[in-house]
């Protein structure tokens, strides 16, 4: 039986029987997408304000992404990184030209990009200071991945429970509290790893002085500033990279999610002075930066830049936030509306899960960011009509669910 001929009931039965239960999945199987809309196995249409959790920046099946995928699939899928790969070099150059960085390492996911950043920080610190600088400071409420090291970097006990002992060498401080970071930095500190905006932690935007303050602190102490832009990067917040809002350039930045238009990729970008700590054999990834994924990522990133999608995300994000604030003024259950660009959230006075389910029933896909936060990460190509429709559904759901 081919996937397109399976109905939802069969798919759910097979998944229940054969897949590990690592996801609390919605009872929904999506089989087709076009732009900001998707369809399930039974033909129902949905407005997608999840976007693969900030992955589908260009929407579903963007023609330039599809064309690049088809062309490269018929040319060369994979060779070893023991050889040079043309689209990998092209993508690295494009990233360097449009960021602070001098060099790039490619992997397969955000967690792997953060693993590479952690390894780079430790190796650089040992070589630069000839001392035991191995500690990474991360922020409570942050999220950096599910591998053992990135799980430890993720200062949320709910994700760590059951996987102890964790990797040593991490220290946690409250997010947005510059004074707490200043007090935490000592002779053992190699780097600070932080999200410019916390995504999984509830779409928390820091005060304007926070990232510049971290930059100054790192300059004063020799500690690396490493920004996890896995969710905020590639135009999501209204600039190509979120750090540009505050003018606080990092030493290392990690990317994934939207970089390859839906294909799996991770990237660790760094300035030359610390990037040189990686030498042949010090780090590697068999599939990282292979011809297929880097060719598609090149097409996706070129499209984001050429079509000025960060600017579009800023405009549409302002429009979406305005519509949501109208709802907040009418429904006391909405405690706060926050976000930047098209990374937006409603904080509620109750669990968000039932509202997410009610939106799904009405053809709108949204997600959570913590128990009481409803999050939206629509494609950057979203238009006002789609935002209006999403606001209509949310208005109806809030009227029904919280009345």
Image (cartoon, grey):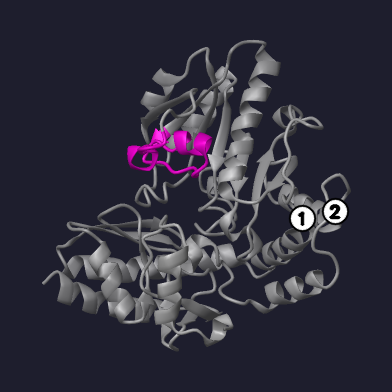
Q: According to the image, label 2 marks what residue? A: 85
Residue at the spot 75% in from the left edge and 40% down from the top edge: 103
Residue 156 vertical placement versus 173 (above, below): below
Instruction: Tell me the element at label 2.
Output: loop
Q: Is 76 left or right of 18, judged from the image as shown?
A: right
Q: Is 47 left or right of 233, judged from the image as shown?
A: left
- State the count of labels: 2
The C terminus appears in which quarter of the rendering? bottom left
Where is residue 43 drawn, in percent x and y?
A: 45, 89
Where is residue 315 drawn, in percent x and y?
A: 48, 68
Q: According to the image, label 1 marks what residue? A: 290
How far apart marks 2 and 1 lie (CA) works out to 7 Å
Residue at the spot 51% in from the left edge and 53% down from the top edge: 231
Mark yes or no: residue 337 visible: yes
Contact check, label 2 and label 1, Cβ < 8 Å: yes
Q: Is 216 left or right of 159, judged from the image as shown?
A: right
**Magenta extent:** 139-163
Categorize mark 2 by other alpha carbons within 10 Å: few (<14), some (14-19), many (20+).
some
The N terminus appears in which quarter of the rendering? bottom right
N-term mark: 2 or 1: 2
């Amino acid at each position: 039986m081919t996937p397109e001929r399976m109905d939802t009931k069969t798919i759910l039965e097979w998944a229940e029987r054969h897949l590990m239960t690592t996801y609390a999945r919605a009872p929904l199987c999506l089989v087709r997408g076009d732009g900001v809309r998707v369809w399930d196995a039974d033909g129902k249409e949905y407005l997608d304000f999840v976007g693969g959790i900030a992955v589908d920046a260009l929407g579903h099946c963007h023609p330039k992404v599809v064309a690049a995928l088809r062309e490269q699939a018929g040319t060369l899928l994979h060779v070893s990184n023991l050889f040079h790969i043309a689209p990998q070099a092209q993508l690295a150059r494009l990233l360097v030209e449009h960021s602070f960085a001098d060099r790039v390492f490619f992997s397969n996911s955000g967690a792997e990009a953060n693993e590479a950043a952690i390894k780079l920080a430790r190796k650089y610190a040992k070589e630069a200071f000839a001392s035991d600088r191995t500690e990474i400071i991360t922020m409570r409420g942050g999220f950096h991945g599910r591998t053992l090291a990135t799980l430890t970097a993720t200062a949320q006990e709910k994700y760590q429970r059951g996987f102890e002992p964790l990797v040593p060498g991490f220290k946690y401080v409250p997010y947005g509290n510059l004074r707490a970071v200043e007090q935490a930095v000592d002779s053992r500190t190699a780097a600070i790893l932080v999200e410019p905006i916390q995504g999984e932690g509830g779409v928390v935007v820091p005060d304007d002085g926070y990232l510049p303050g971290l930059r100054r602190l790192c300059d004063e102490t020799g500690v690396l500033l490493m920004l996890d832009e896995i969710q905020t990067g590639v135009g999501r917040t209204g600039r190509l990279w979120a750090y540009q809002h505050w003018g606080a350039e990092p030493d290392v930045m990690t990317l994934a999610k939207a970089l390859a238009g839906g294909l799996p990729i991770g990237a660790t970008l760094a300035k030359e002075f610390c990037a040189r700590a990686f030498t042949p054999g010090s780090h590697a990834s068999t599939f990282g930066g292979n011809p297929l994924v880097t060719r598609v990522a090149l097409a996706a990133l070129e499209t984001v830049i050429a079509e000025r999608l960060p600017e579009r995300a800023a405009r549409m994000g302002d429009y979406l936030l305005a519509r949501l604030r109208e709802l907040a003024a009418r429904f006391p259950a909405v405690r706060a509306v926050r976000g930047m660009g098209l990374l937006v959230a409603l904080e509620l006075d109750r669990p968000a899960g039932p509202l997410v389910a009610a939106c799904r029933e009405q053809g709108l896909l949204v997600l959570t960011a913590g128990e009481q936060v409803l999050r939206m990460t629509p494609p950057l190509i979203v238009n006002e009509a789609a935002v209006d429709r999403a606001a209509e559904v949310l208005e109806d759901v809030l009227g029904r669910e919280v009345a």
